[in-house]
């Protein structure tokens, strides 16, 4: 509305200049969004990396194998950002847009799942990945049905070798 008012009233050259307060509001909103998106990505990365690092199979890999798996799965620590000034904010947004932050946030869990699968396959080449179907469970009976179906699926696959979930 403020932008439309500036345009409608031809107030772009008015004194005091009406544009700086708008750019400050925009920068503040962008800064908050970038900081939030960065925090979400960093939290997911750190949590998933801790879980992977604590897994028995990960501990059995050499440092070189670990680095190779992380590289193949495009897993790099989320770098710190600086958004204190408009120039720093623009630099961060040039490196990764808000949409790209969202994509990274959504991709990280799958990348870590891929890393876990690759890790297991390095140690057990015959291991097969089994994707257990999702669903909505509302009652204890639903849980039992789902567990039954998952159990059957896993046991059927287990006949052919180790199973990765």
Image: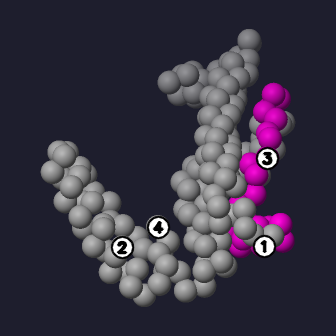
In the structure shown, which secondary structural element does the residue marked by tag 2 occupy?
Answer: helix
**C-alpha distance separating marks 3 and 1:** 23 Å
Q: Do callouts 1 and 4 mark residues in contact (Cβ within 8 Å)?
A: no
Q: How crowded is mark 2: few (under 14 residues within 10 Å), some or many (20 or more)?
A: some
Q: Nearer the viewer, mark 4 or mark 3?
A: 4
Mark yes or no: residue 119 visible. Answer: yes
In the rendered structure, find residue 65 and report the number of the disc placed on it: 1
- Around disc 3, counting alpha carbons within 10 Å, would you say few (fewer than 14), some (14 to 19), or many (20 or more)? few
Q: Which of marks 2 and 3 is nearer the N terminus?
A: 3
Earlier residue among tags 4 and 3: 3
Q: Please tell me which residue is depicted at 75% across the width and 69% down the height of the picture.
A: 61
Residue drawn at x 27%, y 60% is: 147
- Pointer 3 residue: 79
Q: Nearer the viewer, residue 60 or 137?
A: 60
Residue 115, which numbered label? none
* Residue 140 pos. (x, y %): 19, 46
Q: Earlier in the sequence, mark 3 or mark 1?
A: 1
* Label 1 – label 4 distance at C-alpha: 21 Å
**Residues drawn in magenta:** 63-86
Regarding residue 94, the answer to whether it shows in the image is no
Instruction: Name the residue carrying label 4.
Output: 165
Identify which residue is drawn at 78% across, 33% down: 83
Q: Identify residue for label 2.
A: 154
């Amino acid at each position: 509305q403020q932008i439309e008012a500036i345009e409608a009233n031809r107030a772009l050259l008015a004194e005091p200049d009406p544009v700086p307060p708008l750019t400050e509001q925009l920068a503040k909103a962008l800064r908050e969004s970038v900081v939030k998106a960065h925090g979400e990505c960093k939290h997911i990365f750190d949590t998933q990396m801790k879980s992977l690092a604590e897994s028995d199979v990960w501990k059995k890999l050499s440092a070189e194998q670990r680095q190779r798996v992380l590289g193949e799965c495009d897993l790099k620590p989320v770098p710190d950002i600086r958004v204190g000034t408009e120039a720093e904010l623009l630099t961060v947004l040039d490196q990764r847009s808000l949409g790209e932050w969202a994509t990274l946030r959504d991709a990280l869990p799958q990348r870590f799942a891929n890393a876990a699968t690759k890790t297991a396959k390095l140690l057990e080449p015959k291991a097969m990945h089994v994707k257990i179907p999702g669903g909505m469970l509302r009652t204890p009976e639903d849980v039992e049905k789902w567990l039954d179906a998952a159990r059957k699926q896993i046991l059927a696959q287990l006949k052919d070798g180790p199973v990765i979930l």
